[in-house]
Amino acid sequence: MFNNKLFYLGLLLVPLVTSSQDFDSRLAMSVNKDQTSFKTDYFKHQANSVTYINIAAPAVLFTAGLLRHDKKLQRDAAYMTGGFLLSSLLTHSAKKLIKTTRPCDKYPEITKYSSGGGYSFPSGHTSAAFNTATFLCLRYPQWYVIAPACIWASSVGYARI
């Protein structure tokens, strides 16, 4: 049986979906306009920080666990590493399914700041940053862990645009 409510809801969503199809490119253009050397350096630094932090954070936890003979810290390091690997697998699988062209490949006025290749969505850097930040926030729910972790991950996400 035909459901009228679903039909009308679908009609209301068509313009929303249509207008959002190029949202990522418009957003990238607005972020990249009026580019300065400070913004360029900042974006590059944020993109590069993901690799270092995703290696350093579990390494520090594991080392602290060894030094303190604290199995919980050692497990946290293993969980964080496993979460990163799972997040990376899911992100790269989604990239292959969604196949979104990088805005800088589509529009020459958008500058490419990193050597990232392949498809652009979802962002591997942003996914990895939020994976680490989320783990830290959930496992160590103190403001002095949550604030820097969330600011860093959000900053990486902005920089990847």
Image: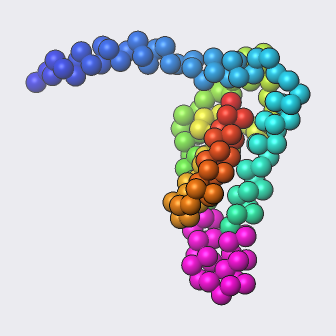
Does residue 98 appear in this view?
Answer: yes
Q: How many marks?
A: 0
Which residue is at 27% across, 19% downward? 9
Q: Residue furthest right?
A: 37
Q: Is residue 63 magenta?
A: yes
Q: Quadrant of the C terminus?
A: top right
In percent of width and height, residue 88 lies at: 61, 52
At 55% from the left and 54% from the top, the residue drawn is 134
Which quarter of the figure has residue 2?
A: top left
Question: Which residue is the extreme one toward the bottom?
Answer: 69
Identify the residue at horizontal 73%, vertical 70% (top origin).
60
Image coordinates of residue 15 in percent, x first then y, are 41, 12
Q: Which residues are magenta?
A: 59-81
Estimate the x, y position of residue 64 in percent, counting from the top left.
70, 77
Question: In the figure, 106 relative to 138: above or below?
Answer: above
Direction from residue 21 to residue 74 in the image, left or right: right
Viewer-proximal residue among 75 and 93: 75
Magenta region includes residue 64: yes
* Quadrant in the picture for residue 3: top left
| In this view, 119 is above or below 25 | below
> In the image, residue 23 lies at what x, y percent?
57, 20
Residue 146 figure quarter: bottom right
In terms of depth relative to the viewer, which is nearer, 124 or 28? 28
Instruction: Looking at the picture, tell me which residue is in the foreground, 55 or 67.
Output: 67
Quadrant occupied by the N terminus: top left
Q: Main secondary structure of the magenta part?
A: helix
Task: Name the side, left or right, on which 151 lies relative to 45.
Answer: left
In the image, 71: left or right of 7?
A: right
* Colour setup of the view: rainbow
Task: In this rendered view, identify the residue nearer to me: 144 or 46.
Answer: 144
